[in-house]
Image (tube, rainbow, N blue to C red):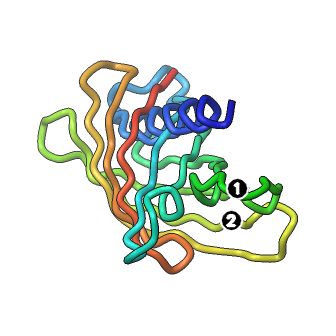
Amino acid sequence: MKKILIAVIALAFSTVSMAQAVDSTETKSNGVDFYVAAGLSIGNSGASTFSATSYPSIEFGFMKGNWALGLVAGRGSNDFSSADHISNYWWSIKNAAYFPIGKSDMDAYALFAVGNYISTKTVFIEYGVGFSYMPTDHLGLFIQGSNWDGIWYITPGLSYSF
């Protein structure tokens, strides 16, 4: 069950982040697009295992023009070797500014987020840059590099805008 939950969260996060890349000329009549994304962040924590240094997440939010605001949630790692606890999970508020790359379906973006581990007083920030590609009007792909809670991560993912 935990593996299925991780897979769903990762897929949803990727979907959201990519949806953020929708160009402002393709927005709906009210100028706001909603999105969901899923991703898997992979850290560079030296000799630690993949499961200890990677985490899945899901994001829901909206985009207006070239700016996005989302609520992100996830698990602090993919390491389920010990008893699970609510403090292993986190949430953050993320905002991103998008910059079209020429006349292509690609955007570059800068992000900043603030969040906390559930049931703790631990607050963290995330900042970084990324690229997104929208091969269709609703489905997208993204990759970003960000510093999250003091560790650098690469995050590939999928997004869906609606």
Question: Residue 125, percent across and down?
Answer: 59, 73
- What type is the residue that disc 1 sits on? Trp
49 with respect to 101 (left or right): right
Tell me if residue 85 comes above or below residue 40 in the rendering.
below
- Nearer to me, 157 or 77: 77
Identify the mark nearer the N-term, 1 or 2.
1
Tell me if residue 149 comes above or below residue 43 in the rendering.
below
The mark found on residue 91 in the picture is: 1
Question: Residue 3, percent across and down?
Answer: 59, 35
Q: Residues within 10 Å of mark 2 (few under 14, many from 20)?
A: many
Residue under label 2, please give it.
Answer: 115
Q: Residue at x 72, y 58 (%)?
A: 82
Question: Residue 140, percent across and down?
Answer: 34, 30
- What type is the residue that disc 2 sits on? Gly
Q: Residue furthest bottom?
A: 150
Question: Residue 11, percent across and down?
Answer: 49, 32
Q: Which secondary structure lies at badge 2?
A: strand
79 with respect to 37 (left or right): right
- Nearer to me, 48 or 139: 48
Q: Is residue 63 visible?
A: no
Q: Is residue 156 visible?
A: yes
84 with respect to 96 (left or right): right
The reply to whether dot 1 and dot 2 touch (C-beta < 8 Å) is yes
Tell me if residue 117 comes above or below residue 135 in the rendering.
below
Quarter of the picture containing the N terminus is top right
Q: Residue at x 48, y 26 (%)?
A: 161
